[in-house]
Image (cartoon, rainbow, N blue to C red):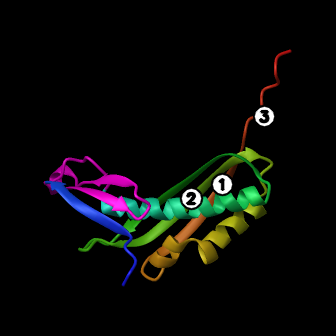
């Protein structure tokens, strides 16, 4: 038998309650134009969030192992969807914004490469049908304030 990953229960109109295999619960809903009340995530948003979260966890873990002094980290996913139904994602671009002290570009590039080619199961799942590209930028963090004596 297959391993259960998620359960979705209908609440009302286009609102559903989703439970993941971790036990966490979230609300799914559609836009008002589609009969919903905008009370929760749309399923296509969750795909983009899943990709961003999966690669973010990989990259920050790898940067910590490389002893990079990261003070802030953000991952943004943008892209294109097909014009015709089922309006699937056709292209996704992952942008990594790494802020810290003396961050090495080579370390960031390698962490992203490892996430993309080895670790991120979401990217690996999407890739046969979706073109995934990435870019990154590094921002130097402000120096820590000197303590007042």
- Tell me which residue sits at (66%, 57%) in the image: 60
SS at mark 1 in the image: strand
Task: Count neighbours of disc 1 (C-alpha within 10 A) and say few if under 14, some if 14 to 19, many if 20 or more.
Answer: few
Q: What residue is pinned by disc 1?
A: 137
Task: Count neighbours of disc 3 (C-alpha within 10 A) and say few if under 14, some if 14 to 19, many if 20 or more.
Answer: few
> Where is residue 112 shown, x and y percent of the image?
65, 66
> Where is residue 63 shown, x and y percent of the image?
72, 58
Marks 2/1 in contact by CB < 8 Å: the verdict is yes
Of mark 3 and mark 2, the one earlier in the sequence is 2
- Is 15 in the magenta? yes
Q: What residue is pinned by disc 2?
A: 95
Q: Disc 1 to disc 3, how far (Cα)? A: 19 Å
- Tell me which residue sits at (82%, 24%) in the image: 146
Q: Which residues are magenta?
A: 13-41
SS at mark 3 in the image: loop
> Where is residue 39 shown, x and y percent of the image?
25, 46
Marks 1/3 in contact by CB < 8 Å: the verdict is no
| The C terminus, quarter of image | top right
Q: Examine the image and state in which quarter residue 49 appears.
A: bottom left
- Using the image, determine if residue 75 lies above or below residue 145: below
Q: Examine the image and state in which quarter residue 78 appears.
A: bottom left
Q: Disc 2 to disc 1, how far (Cα)? A: 8 Å
Task: Count neighbours of disc 2 (C-alpha within 10 A) and say few if under 14, some if 14 to 19, many if 20 or more.
Answer: some
- Tell me which residue sits at (56%, 59%) in the image: 95
- Is 40 in the magenta? yes
Q: What residue is pinned by disc 3?
A: 143
> Where is residue 22 shown, x and y percent of the image?
44, 61
- Using the image, determine if residue 148 lies above or below residue 84: above
Which is closer to the viewer, label 1 or label 3? 3
């Amino acid at each position: 038998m297959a391993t259960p990953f998620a359960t979705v229960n209908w609440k009302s109109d286009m609102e559903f309650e989703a439970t993941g295999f971790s036990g966490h619960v979230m609300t799914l809903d559609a836009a008002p134009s589609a009969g919903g009340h905008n009370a929760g995530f749309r399923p296509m948003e969750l795909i983009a969030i899943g990709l961003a979260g999966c690669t973010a966890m990989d990259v920050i873990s790898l940067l910590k192992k490389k002893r990079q002094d990261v003070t802030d980290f953000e991952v943004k996913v943008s892209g294109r969807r097909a014009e015709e139904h089922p309006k699937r994602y056709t292209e996704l671009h992952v942008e990594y914004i790494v802020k810290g002290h003396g961050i090495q570009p080579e370390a960031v590039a390698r962490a992203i490469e490892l996430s993309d080619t080895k670790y991120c199961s979401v990217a690996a799942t999407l890739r046969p049908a979706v073109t995934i590209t990435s870019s990154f930028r590094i921002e130097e963090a402000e120096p820590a304030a000197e303590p007042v004596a």
